[in-house]
């Protein structure tokens, strides 16, 4: 048994009696074609107890669950949302910065313990497959011991099937199409945004990026555009010149300002734009100087239901 588990680890990388009219008072509302849940809306590697690390869940009316990035606190937020980690077996990574991948071990290991019986499928930039292979080796002891002890756990459920992607359609199944497109995250190359199309509706996610013409090209006409935003904090007398210069460099070379997102939104013309990976009232006010379309500040456990109408529901409401 021990050798079998070790070998597996190393592979990681109403029928009615008569027709009758439905009771409109009691019939459940039809699920929207697309539902997007912001599991984590925070930015950067520093710990934020209100806004967890970047992570977005896209669900279709037929039950598909697609996860985009897997930042700190993903497992807690998904559980709070009411979905088992074992129910998620498709992960798409925008890039390999730590704040976007820290909870992959939770998804891999706890998802297995919570009933995933097929390999975790992971798509991401160059280096994704190598990272997932090493992850299996890192947790070899835990996987082997639990696998030998609990015969309910399947060997396939702890494996990963990983793909280093290039720009283009990378997933197409059950009428769901996922397209990856290159964005500009400064020296972090390659970095991707994603677009999901299903049942005539669509959502695009920027990932981390500076102002990107390629993002505009691939996002035009989407129902929902979730975009990052960054802003230079006001001068702090306790801040050194070196720290200030580094902060300016991060915003300038890696991210998109609110004024720049306004240009993006104006050209993409989404039915709704949402800030995630940052964003606050000051960013909203700045963007609305030149952009008049619907724009929301994303927050953890916000859901956006996309159909003929778009419904935004915030946590606890």
Image (cartoon, helix red, strand yellow):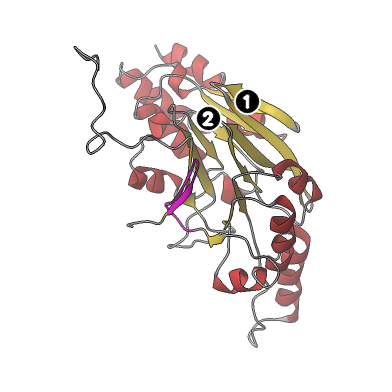
Counting from the top left corner in percent of width and height, residue 28 is at: 29, 35
Rendered position, 169 above or below 187: above
- List x then y, in percent, for residue 228: 63, 56
Is 281 rendered above or below residue 89?
Answer: below
The range drawn in magenta is 299-312
Mark 2 Cα-neighbour bin, 10 Å: few <14, some 14–19, many ≥20: some
* SS under mark 1: strand
Q: Is residue 203 visible?
A: yes
Residue carrying label 2 = 90
Is any atom of residue 38 visible in this view? no
Q: Are marks 2 and 1 in contact (CB under 8 Å)?
A: yes
Whether residue 302 is in magenta: the answer is yes
Q: Residue furthest left?
A: 17
Point out the image quarter for the C terminus. Answer: bottom left
Q: CA distance from mark 2 to mark 1?
A: 10 Å
* Residue at horizontal 75 percent and vertical 80 percent from the top: 241
Residue 48 pos. (x, y %) = 48, 63
Of callouts 2 and 1, the N-terminal one: 2
Spot occupied by residue 163 in the image (x, y as percentages of width and height)? 66, 26
Horizontally, residue 226 falls left or right of residue 210, namely: left
Image quadrant where residue 167 sits: top right
Q: Is 266 on the left or on the right of 15, as rendered?
A: right
Where residue 274 sits, quadrant-wise, is bottom right
Within the magenta stretch, is there residue 162? no
Picture quarter with the N terminus = top left
The foreground one among 23 and 87 is 23
Which residue bears the numbered disc 1? Answer: 171
Residue nearer the viewer, 289 or 184: 289
The residue drawn where x is 52% and y is 45% is 56
Graded by Cα atoms within 10 Å as few (under 14), some (14 to 19) or many (20 or more), the crowding at tag 1 reads few
């Amino acid at each position: 048994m021990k050798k079998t588990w070790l070998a597996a680890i190393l592979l990681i990388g109403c029928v009615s009696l008569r027709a009758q009219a439905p009771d409109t008072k009691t019939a459940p509302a039809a699920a929207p074609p697309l539902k997007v849940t912001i599991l984590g809306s925070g930015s950067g590697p520093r710990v934020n107890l209100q806004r967890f690390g970047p992570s977005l869940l896209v669900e279709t009316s037929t039950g598909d669950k697609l996860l985009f990035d897997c930042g700190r606190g993903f497992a807690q937020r998904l559980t709070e949302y009411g979905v088992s980690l074992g129910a998620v077996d498709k992960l798409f990574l925008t890039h390999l910065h730590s704040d976007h991948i820290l909870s992959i071990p939770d998804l891999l290991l706890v998802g297995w313990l919570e009933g995933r019986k097929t390999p975790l499928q992971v798509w991401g930039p160059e280096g994704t497959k190598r990272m997932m292979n090493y992850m299996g080796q890192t947790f070899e002891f835990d996987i082997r011991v639990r696998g030998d002890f609990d015969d309910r756990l399947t060997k396939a459920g702890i494996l990963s099937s990983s793909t280093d992607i290039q720009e283009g359609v990378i997933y197409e199944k059950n009428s769901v199409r996922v397209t990856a497109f290159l964005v500009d995250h400064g020296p972090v190359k390659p970095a991707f945004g994603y677009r999901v199309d299903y049942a005539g509706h669509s959502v695009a996610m920027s990932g981390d990026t500076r102002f990107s013409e390629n993002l505009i090209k691939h996002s035009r006409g989407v129902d929902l555009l979730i975009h990052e935003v960054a802003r230079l904090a006001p001068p702090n007398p306790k801040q050194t010149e070196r720290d200030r210069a580094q902060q300016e460099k991060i915003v300038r070379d890696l991210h998109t300002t609110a004024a720049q997102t306004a240009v993006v939104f104006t050209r993409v013309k989404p039915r709704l734009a949402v800030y995630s990976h940052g964003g606050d009232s000051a960013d909203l006010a700045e963007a609305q100087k030149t952009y008049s379309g619907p724009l929301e500040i994303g927050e953890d456990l916000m859901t956006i239901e996309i159909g003929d109408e778009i419904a935004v529901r915030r946590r606890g409401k």
